[in-house]
Image (cartoon, rainbow, N blue to C red):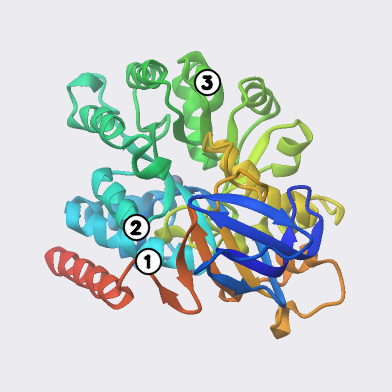
Amino acid sequence: MIFSDITLYAPDGSILPHRYLSVQQDRIAAISASPIEPEKGERVINGKNRLLMPGLVNTHTHIPMSLLRGYAENLPLQRWLNEKVFPFEDRLTPEDVYAGSMLSMAEMLRFGTTSFTDMYYFCDRTAEAMLSVGMRGNISRGIVCPDPAVKLTDLPAYQEAVDLFTAYHHAGNDLIRVDFSAHAEYTNTEDAIRTIAKTAAEYGARVHIHLSETLLEHEECKGRHNGMTPTAFFEYCGMFSNPVTAAHGVYLEEEDIRILKSHSAAVAHNPVSNLKLGSGIAPVSDMLDAGLRVTLGTDGPASNNQHNLWEEIKLASILQKGVRKDPTLMPPEKVIAMATAEGAASQGRTDTGEIAVGKKADLIMIDLDTPNMTSAHPIANQLAYSMDGSNILLTMVDGKILYQNGEWLTLDIERVKFDAIQSAKRILGELS
Ligand SMILES: [Zn+2]
């Protein structure tokens, strides 16, 4: 396939007009300033008034929670969880998780996301949904083990995490990678966190955790563990000897940022979810000043309520400018890198997240010929501040077009919407 006479978004944020890019199998095979002759039968996509850039990477979400979109609103976190989310989740079946995963992937592809980092359960169903659709992602079985009388290795969740790794790590031409996950400090014993850290090291896997999302969580941890913050506690338990993606980091202290940086951990920043749940605003500028890798996520659709990373890109940028009273912070190229190359790196993927020869063809094509994108000025500014997910014309993962011009090519969108509504309605019936 050839993208012809198209504008490219280069890895350094520069804009390359009138380029020709060919995709062969799952890779970007060639990029040229002069026309590339199509081989017989090769498909050519006209790139006039179009921008081709790397697909976005959503580095923290819980995709089956699309079934809870709009269900639990305007409640403080503990009531949100205990009164609404947990009772609903208790009734989810593996097939509900499949339905919710399919709906979220349809939404992500529509808005130009090509890869995601997920934490949930019944993850084998999410994995099967990913293989069926052809979408990329790192998935993990979120482990919760708060009872000191319970040994983690006796819990079914532990075996599920190991089985998931064995069955799906690198599956589908490396579409799927499997991480290990401790849900959070406040939901696990020291022994459980140490066991997860050790298991991830044994398998050479990455780790996905929630970290200092709320002030309550952060301060209670200090009370429980001799003044140690959640970051210090995870370090004490050996978790950071593995590559870690830590979601939120809203209450990170200076020393926490130093610890995370010293272990090359990544922080997944979820500005919409943090604001909507009233959690606060993460000190992202301080993290970036310290050289920490910061990426972007939506968090689950119950707390966002969409899988639209363009909203996170804009909000991440303007929040730091506003809070720090400094409009020079978080320039567009930096925030776009956080949503693309940095996100891919946080997944341990060095072969995607950029447009370059030899990289995986995880690409999105944007319509520049719309009122909100029409500008004589640098395109990066429009990507960060004017762009809307509906400007996406085409989403390609691993060299395959999965979404184009309103059509999903590897899923039946009517069926996906129907199944998701049926699952949600059945659960609501059981709860009433
Ligand atoms: Zn989360």
- Asked whether disc 2 touches disc 1, contact meaning CB atoms under 8 Å apart, the reply is yes
**Numbered badge on residue 189:** none
Mark 2 within 8 Å of ligand 1, using the beta carbon: no
Left or right side of 208 for 57: right
Give the residue at x 30% y 37%. 168
How many C-alpha atoms fall within 10 Å of the one at disc 2: few (<14), some, or many (≥20)?
Answer: many
In the figure, 212 relative to 422: above or below? above
Q: Position of residue 258 (x, y in %)?
A: 69, 23
Q: Label 1 to label 3, Cα distance in Å?
A: 33 Å
Q: Give the amino acid at mark 1.
A: Arg
Q: Earlier in the sequence, mark 1 or mark 3?
A: 1
Quarter of the image for residue 48 reads bottom right
Left or right side of 341 for 81: left
Instruction: Report which residue position mark 1 lands on.
Output: 69
Quarter of the image for residue 322 reads bottom right
Q: Judging from the image, what secondary structure is the residue with disc 2 in?
A: helix
- Asked whether disc 3 touches disc 2, contact meaning CB atoms under 8 Å apart, the reply is no
Q: Label 3 to label 2, Cα distance in Å?
A: 28 Å
In the figure, 287 relative to 129: above or below? above
**Numbered badge on residue 65:** 2
Mark 1 within 8 Å of ligand 1, using the beta carbon: no
Q: Judging from the image, what secondary structure is the residue with disc 3 in?
A: helix
**Numbered badge on residue 240:** 3
Position of the C terminus, as image quadrant, is bottom left
Q: Position of residue 316 (x, y in %)?
A: 67, 55
- Residue toward you, 99 or 30: 30
Q: Label 2 to label 1, Cα distance in Å?
A: 7 Å
- Asked whether disc 1 touches disc 3, contact meaning CB atoms under 8 Å apart, the reply is no
- Residue toward you, 165 or 316: 165
Q: Judging from the image, what secondary structure is the residue with disc 1 in?
A: loop
